Amino acid sequence: MPSYAEDRAEIEDLMARYLFALDWGDGDAYAACFTEDGEIDWARETTRGRPALAAMCNGFAAAMEAIMGKGVPHRHFLSHVAVTVKGDTAQARAAWFEAARREDGFGKSSFGHYEDHLVRVGGRWLFRRRKIYNEFLPGRTAGATNPVMEEGMKR
């Protein structure tokens, strides 16, 4: 059985691969971060299954290009990662923010946190369910409760 440090490193690597795939509009790599029936609850909808996840990622890249302009870098960053592992399942919470280069310089465009439920499949950690809290959108804020004090996240 892998150590907590090995599991955590693999989960953090998965989180990074997810963000690189999202920011570069690589729908196949994005979908590969999830189980076959994995889902993401994000600002607009809940998307389920790898084909739909790949299409959603590709659509997001096109939407961001329409908003920011062609060739304008738009990147997500991860911080404050908390991980609890129980055998072949895990929960993680992580803060995120995104930034983009703009004509008037650099700007932060949004922020929030992820709440993840992960499973180990074939020796690899994958997202089973990822919920995105967007602190700047009404109805998508995290609320007043510390997300790492929820049942299952306590150490």
Image (cartoon, rainbow, N blue to C red):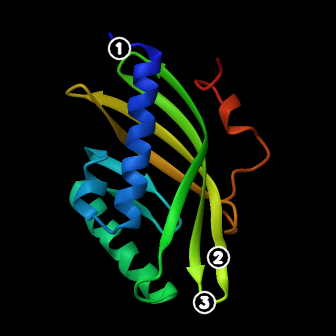
The residue tagged 3 is 103
Camera-nearest label, 2 or 1: 2
Task: Please identify the quadrant where the C terminus is shown.
Answer: top right
Camera-nearest label, 3 or 1: 3
Residue 105 placement (x, y as % from top left): 65, 82
Q: Is residue 23 left or right of residue 140?
A: left
Quick check: can you spot residue 84?
yes
Q: Is residue 137 left or right of residue 132?
A: right
Residue 119 placement (x, y as % from top left): 35, 30
Q: Is residue 107 left or right of residue 16?
A: right
Earlier sequence position, callout 3 versus callout 1? 1
Question: Residue at left 50%, top 31%?
Answer: 91
Q: Amino acid type of disc 3?
A: Glu
| Mark 3 vs mark 1, CA separation in Å | 47 Å
The residue tagged 1 is 2
Disc 3 packing (10 Å; few <14; some 14–19; many ≥20): few
Residue 122 placement (x, y as % from top left): 19, 27
The residue tagged 2 is 106
- Whether 88 is drawn above or below 112: the answer is above
